[in-house]
Image: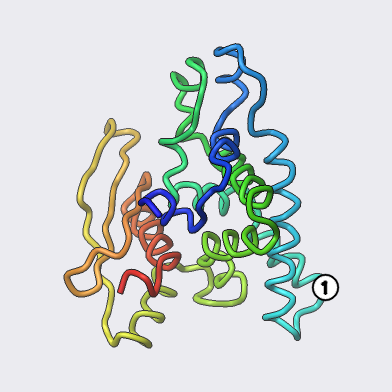
């Protein structure tokens, strides 16, 4: 596997499926091509609901129907899918038309969430339900664990608990860059365990950048340590 395959956790037998999952309709219209991610997004949305519901049902046997529904919605809501897309770096790989590109489409929450759903659909078509289940659980692990009851939604706390329990160390954070105008800054944070960087995240505040870095680290444990 190359670095992109390893990040995805799936090697596509048909790479054109992944290309389609990253193609916005604005690109297709501008290039005179047929096809975009919308059909795959439709399929991915259905798969996400099923896999997340099944995962929670198996791991929360005492939860009521209403509680399971609430927890599932926490995981499949737009904000959660956007975070997963950012952790994967999907924004830089989207195929967008000039208008979407110019208007900041690569950073738009709705496009990032939609593209993540489309990639889920592509993984399913390429590798079947087992591959799709593995992909979803791998890349939504922080959100799944949080919905299950860990750390009350605080990814930094959840990461600290995991690392301390297994490696007897405490993660630390550092801001490595600040970009953008004063009224709309963008912070980039690294989280380290010992001297090893285990996650990188960005956000409009230091706290959000650190939370994003913690989420990246959680999705990669224990591979990175």
Q: Is residue 56 left or right of residue 101?
A: right
Q: Which residue is mark 1?
A: 65
The answer to whether residue 158 is above or below residue 94 is below
Give the percent coordinates (x, y) of residue 113: 58, 43
Q: Is residue 3 left or right of residue 130?
A: left
The answer to whether residue 41 is above or below residue 99 is below
**Residue appearing at x 54%, y 40% in the figure:** 15
Give the percent coordinates (x, y) of residue 45: 71, 48
What is the crowding at mark 1: few (fewer than 14 residues within 10 Å), some, or many (at least 20)? few
The answer to whether residue 192 is above or below residue 39 is below
> Please, which residue is most extreme toward the right here?
65
Q: Nearer the viewer, residue 6 or 90?
A: 6
**Residue appearing at x 59%, y 68% in the figure:** 144
**Residue appearing at x 17%, y 70% in the figure:** 195
Give the percent coordinates (x, y) of residue 5: 44, 52
Q: How many marks?
A: 1
Q: Quadrant of the C terminus?
A: bottom left
Give the percent coordinates (x, y) of residue 157: 41, 74
Q: Quadrant of the N terminus?
A: bottom left
Q: Nearer the viewer, residue 144 or 121?
A: 121
| Residue 35 in which image quadrant | top right
The answer to whether residue 95 is above or below residue 8 is above
Secondary structure of the residue carrying numbered label 1: helix
Figure coloring:
rainbow
**Residue appearing at x 63%, y 42% in the figure:** 118
> Please, which residue is most extreme toward the left here?
195
């Amino acid at each position: 596997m190359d670095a992109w395959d390893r990040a995805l956790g799936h090697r596509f037998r048909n790479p054109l499926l992944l290309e389609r999952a990253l193609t916005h309709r604005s690109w297709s219209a501008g290039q005179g091509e047929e096809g975009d991610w919308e059909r795959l997004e439709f399929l991915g949305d259905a798969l996400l609901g099923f896999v997340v519901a099944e995962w929670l049902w198996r791991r929360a046997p005492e939860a009521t129907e209403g509680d399971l529904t609430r927890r599932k919605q926490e995981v499949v809501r737009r904000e959660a899918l956007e975070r997963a897309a950012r952790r994967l770096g999907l924004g830089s790989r989207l195929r967008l038309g000039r208008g979407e590109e110019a208007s900041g489409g690569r950073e738009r929450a709705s496009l990032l969430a939609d593209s993540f759903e489309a990639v889920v659909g592509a993984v399913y078509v390429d590798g079947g339900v087992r591959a799709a289940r593995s992909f979803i659980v791998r890349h939504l692990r922080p959100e799944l664990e949080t919905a299950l009851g860990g750390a009350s939604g605080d990814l930094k706390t959840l990461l600290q608990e995991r690392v301390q329990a297994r490696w007897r160390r405490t993660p630390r954070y550092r801001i490595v860059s600040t970009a953008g105008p004063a009224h709309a800054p963008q912070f980039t944070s690294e989280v380290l365990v010992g001297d090893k960087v285990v996650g990188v995240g960005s956000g409009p505040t230091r706290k959000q950048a650190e939370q994003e870095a913690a989420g990246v680290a959680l999705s990669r444990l224990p591979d990175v340590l």
